Amino acid sequence: MSAAQPGGAEPSSPRYTLWQLLAYMLGLGSWGFGGPVALVGFMYRDLVERRQWIGEADYKEGLALAQLMPGPLAAQLAIYLGYVHYRVPGATAAGLAFVLPSFCMVLALGAAYRAFGGIGWMQAVFYGVGAAVIGIIAMSAYKLTSRNIGKDGLLWAIFLLSAGVTVITKSELVWLFLGAGVLVWLLRAPPRFTGRLNGWAASAPMAGAALLAGADWPKLVELGAFFAYAGSFVFGSGLAIVPFLYGGVVQEHHWLNDRQFVDAVAVAMITPGPVVITTGFIGYLVAGFWGAVVAALATFVPCYLFTILPAPYFKKHGKRPGIVAFVDGVTAAAIGAIAGAVIVIGQRSITDGPTAALAILTVALLWRFKQLPEPLIVLVAAVAGLLLYPLSHA
């Protein structure tokens, strides 16, 4: 086995086969609980430190690209790491392997939910899990805020504005996200109009929104258009898609009611892999198996394209101040929307004393025990729901 090149560069030939990478991503997608931060940490530990398949420099570049472009963080990093040595075939295989296990799980849960949703035990399980999910999202919003906003006054103003808009309108405005990015870009790294990359960085998401915003097609095409639109604006954490989905799925299209939507988020928390796989569960409830396939594909295709298309050019241009500033603004607005969504969705999930206690206890446990696995909390909440639901609905 040859030693790694200085500076984090990779040897000329990879130390692993594409099949080995595929097997690793299938495994990570099957047991990788803990959300995007945990998943990208697993990839660093396993692929950079332990197996030394990926160099430090390539990993950092992939992580920076995943944070820069719209798309779920962990899924995009998996796609980029597949691209490092095996280009488009590797990126495609790694992305599919990472997402496929959790998709199969939510498909099975969707079938069970539709078949047995009216049975008391399933209602009781989601009674407890739904409340715990609110606590988990609240803590995620806190962590994202502290890590990404800090003491930055401009980003705090954007955060508060986005949170307020989300609470008042019970949805979030895409143009607020983009406007925040452009504002920070213009204030902190105004363009000199000597190159084209900064302009493309701001205009590409806007063009995508304009092309997809007015779709009015049959159900599957309508599902595909909506989820592609939503998937194009998930920056950093998969939880950023929650307010987007709530506004479209519940408020605009009325595909699901409030209870079903919270259950869909709960399913995403129960299963390993990326949180945004909840779109597959929603698609199944709306239009069965093909609805799940279309919703999941439409959500992940944008993040796939946003990874492989700029990958060859990212090493040269990715650290430009204009791009960094644009992403800072969008991220602050996205985190604000997550915080606002905690209030909006919490009003539907926390309906009595027991659910309020479960949500508060979840926050307290996550605050006290930093390494406490979220799936364990969800499992305990499910058991609590089974015990408490009959008493609260007697």
Image: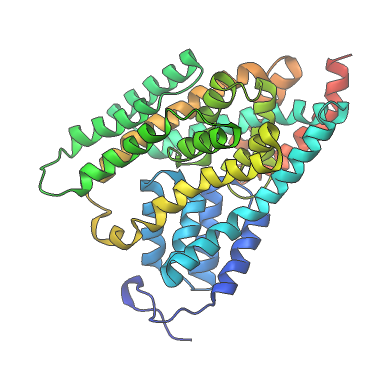
Q: Is residue 5 visible?
A: yes
- In what quadrant of the picture does the C terminus appear? top right
Q: Residue at x 42, y 81 (%)?
A: 13
Up-down relation of residue 61 to residue 255 (above or below): below
Furthest residue toward front: 218
Q: Could you tell me residue 70's position as x and y percent?
A: 41, 43
Q: Could you tell me residue 327's position as x and y percent?
A: 32, 40
Up-down relation of residue 159 to residue 266 (above or below): above
Residue 10 occupies quadrant: bottom left
Q: Residue at x 39, y 47 (%)?
A: 67
Residue placed most toward the observer, 213 or 99? 213
Left or right of 267 in this view: 10: left
- The colour scheme used to paint the residues is rainbow
Left or right of 12 in this view: 296: right
Q: Is residue 372 visible?
A: no
Furthest residue toward bottom: 1
Up-down relation of residue 221 to residue 309 (above or below): above
Up-down relation of residue 238 to residue 46 (above or below): above
Left or right of 234 in this view: 218: right
Q: Residue at x 65, y 21 (%)?
A: 258
Q: Could you tell me residue 41's position as x and y percent?
A: 52, 56
Q: Could you tell me residue 390's position as x and y percent?
A: 88, 20
